[in-house]
Amino acid sequence: MVDIRLSYSRTKGFGLTLTRKFLLVTALVFVLAVVLLGKWIVRNIQHEVLIKNADFAAYYMNSFVEPNVQSLETADQLSPDDYAALDAISKDPSLRAHVLVIKIWLPNGKVVFSTDKAIEGHSFDPQELQRSLQGKIDAYLDDLTDEENSHERGLEGPIYEVYLPLRSQRTDRIIAVGEFYESASNLKQHLYEAFIGSLTVLGGLAGITLIGLYLIVRWGTATIDRQRAGLQSLGAAHLNLSQQNADLLRDVEAAKQNLLDIDRLFMRRVGLDLHDGPSQLLAFVLMNLDEIADLETSIKGGDLAEGEATGAIRAQVERIKSATSEALTEIRAISNSLFAPETSATAAAPLAQLVAEFVARTGMKVDGSGLELLDVLPEAARQSLSRVVIEGLTNSFKHSGADQIELEVSRTATHLNINICDNGTGIAAQDALLKAARSGRLGLLGMRHRVESLGGSLGIDSRPGASTVLSVHIPLAAFEGKT
């Protein structure tokens, strides 16, 4: 029996349905995704804003600052005129409204101009100038941790800085790097608003998506529940079918027992047929032979003329011939009705005894092994397989021209196996089966019938001019639960 139990929509440990689990996990994933995506959007907005501001700074530098650093092309400091012009530009009220600090760097890291006069003439690490010295504009929010940022650390609010190359108007060679510090308070506010806005939009979209997925999963769960109910119904039907199969197996066992009983009755009927038919005819033959002997005595004693006696003897011989022919016909008819092999012992006798009788009757040499494995089988199976073995031996004796036969009975974990191999000239197996069926000889067909009634298989491996191997394979399950 098979007990089918399906339980997958609920968990006993936490009492959560599949739908609620999905909702909880998906919500956590969506929240994390929304936050990360919002930060990514803000980062991109920040980058774009800085690039635009850097472009504005580059325009300003090129227009107002770069013309006043041309003296750096041939010297390592600004000319007085250039310095005065830059100082005037840095004090312009409209510029100071958003530009907090201006610095002019030499490529070696020396500050030649700054609104923070304390660092003019000092040299610092030129690492941050490298991209600008390669002709690129660089802009980023500064944490003001560098040594030259002591002045900027005193300023209020967040600050971003822009680095851009300053070129010689004569040779287009980079002769200095300009640095702007601008207030990032408005930028920070805009970025915060953009972050909140992106969270709102993304959260709304995520919520709508989550609701849609929740409805889909809920519908799927309902479908699973319906299918589970259907499977449980099928399981019940399967149990019912298994019970029916068990009943059928019992019926089959009963039928096999009935077949054994019928077989016994059939053998008894055959015995009566032999007694009432051929036996009576043979008794008649013996009587006629006795009469012929009496006639011969009468001729010798002179009681009967030789001519008269000769006629009587001829008549007796004709009667004997007729009775013998009739007896032979009846014996053949009875033989054709039997499946049993030719043996003087009953099929219930031990297989070793049956084989010994076969050897004594035929003079064949039989090398047997494992014969005792058949003796412990249930009676019906022992009778059938013993008849199969003796019939196989008899066929080898009659048809193959063999003088030696190997008989092996073996057992594996799942099957009982019988192999009969002779050293004869072989037969055409399929042709032999067809001829047997057409001619009324039931030896091979009877063997196959008996083997298949036990759920097994019979094979014949033979061809003209070679030995014949007859193999029988019976599953051990055919004998379970039997006595």
Image (cartoon, helix red, strand yellow):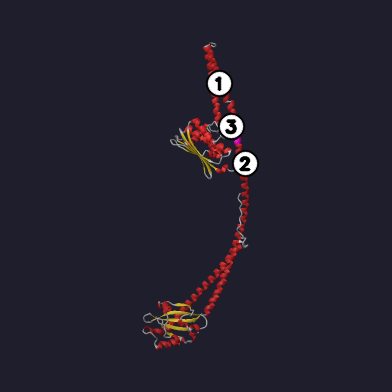
Q: Viewed as shown, does residue 154 lie left or right of 252?
A: left
Mark closer to the observer (2, 3) = 3
Mark 1–mark 3 distance (CA, rounded to whole Å): 26 Å
Q: Give the range drawn in magenta.
A: 260-270
Q: Which of marks 1 and 3 is nearer the N terminus?
A: 3
Where residue 18 appears, as percent x and y from the top left, is 60, 61
Q: Is residue 261 magenta?
A: yes
- For label 1, count other residues whose C-alpha is less than 10 Å away and answer few (under 14), some (14-19) or many (20+): few
Name the amino acid type tagged 1: Leu
Where residue 368 appears, as percent x and y from the top left, is 49, 37
Residue at the spot of label 2: 251
Mark 2–mark 1 distance (CA, rounded to whole Å): 50 Å
Q: Are marks 2 and 1 in contact (CB under 8 Å)?
A: no
Residue at the spot of label 3: 267
Secondary element at tag 3: helix
Residue at the spot of label 1: 286
Q: Is residue 478 magenta?
A: no
Q: Quadrant of the C terminus?
A: top right
